[in-house]
Amino acid sequence: MLFALPVGYSLYLRFMTTDSHRTSVRSREFGAQLRLLRKELGITGQALAEDLHWVGSTITRLEQGQNAAGATGLNTLLTVCGLRGNRLKEYLARATAEDNGYYLAPHGDLISDDLLALMIHEEVATRIVGFDQTFIPGLLQTEAYSRTLFAKAGLSKEAIERAVRKRALRQKLLNREDPAPPRCVFFLHENVLRSPVGGNSVMAEQMITLLMACGEERITIRVLPISEHESSPSCALRLMEFAKFSPIGYAEVLGASAFLEQPSDIERYRARLSLLDHAALDEDDSRSLLTNLERLYGQP
């Protein structure tokens, strides 16, 4: 679900860190949507519960992603929050759909950075491990690199600048102070580093940014060399881990993002990432390769 979050939403979404073992990606996304709707109304959860003649904790539990109301109750709640017509039907359909460990969240022609389910889970992740074989991951991209990709995707000038700002906002989670940022391991295919997106000057700046990231205590960058192509997964993938609920596998496709929660899928993700861990260059060799590429791209 695409949803506009306020600036500084990292603090706004700390409610996600409550005990949520029995929740899912879908239910936590709905809880975040409900919280945003309530904030737009300018009322407290207690006041909203009183208007509905509900127990005060019901709204809190719903916003945490817990199943605290049936379809009829949700219909009444969302109507009170101002939803009508197709928008009401869409919210109800998402809120009452069966959680089977798979959630395909569409974003159409818009960027995945606008995806509420992605943003709220990145914000509360304690560890993120991912592999990219086509582009530098969004969390590490420079503005010039991002702008080039968005332009090639056919976005208008206004949409490009909006997308660049949105991506920069997402990146703030890597250097925030409170709460501590997630520990991140980024596996990058060497072909990604050697693909001159935007030209040499853009790539030189991007290499410097990656080298600076290597110096951060909670960020690790490992390069999968071209010689290890047999160890490369067939698609980009990411595993996110959390303090209060189960890990999530994430993969982005054209027009949608997939969230996987089944234990068997998580084990597949872990197995592929373990193979990458054995095949990729270590941190020092990866840093050396980035340094050489920065010099190469920086030549006049």
Image: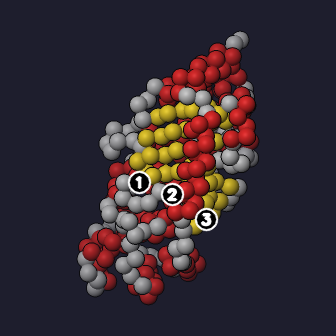
Seen from this angle, which residue lies furthest top?
300
Q: Using the image as rendered, state which of residue 292 and residue 58 is in the foreground.
A: 292
The answer to which of marks 1 and 2 sits earlier in the sequence is: 1
Q: Give the percent coordinates (x, y) of residue 161.
A: 60, 42
Q: Give the percent coordinates (x, y) of residue 147.
A: 64, 37
Q: Quadrant of the C terminus?
A: top right
- Residue behind mark 3: 104
The answer to which of marks 2 and 3 sits earlier in the sequence is: 3
Q: Residue at x 58, y 52 (%)?
A: 269
Q: CA distance from mark 1 to mark 2?
A: 9 Å
Element on which disc 1 rests: strand
Tell me if mark 2 has few (under 14), some (14-19) or many (20+) residues whose alpha carbon lies within 10 angstroms of its own: many
Position above or below: 197 against 130: above
Q: CA distance from mark 2 to mark 3?
A: 13 Å
Q: Give the percent coordinates (x, y) of residue 146.
A: 63, 38
Q: Give the percent coordinates (x, y) of residue 19.
A: 32, 63
Position above or below: 31 against 196: below
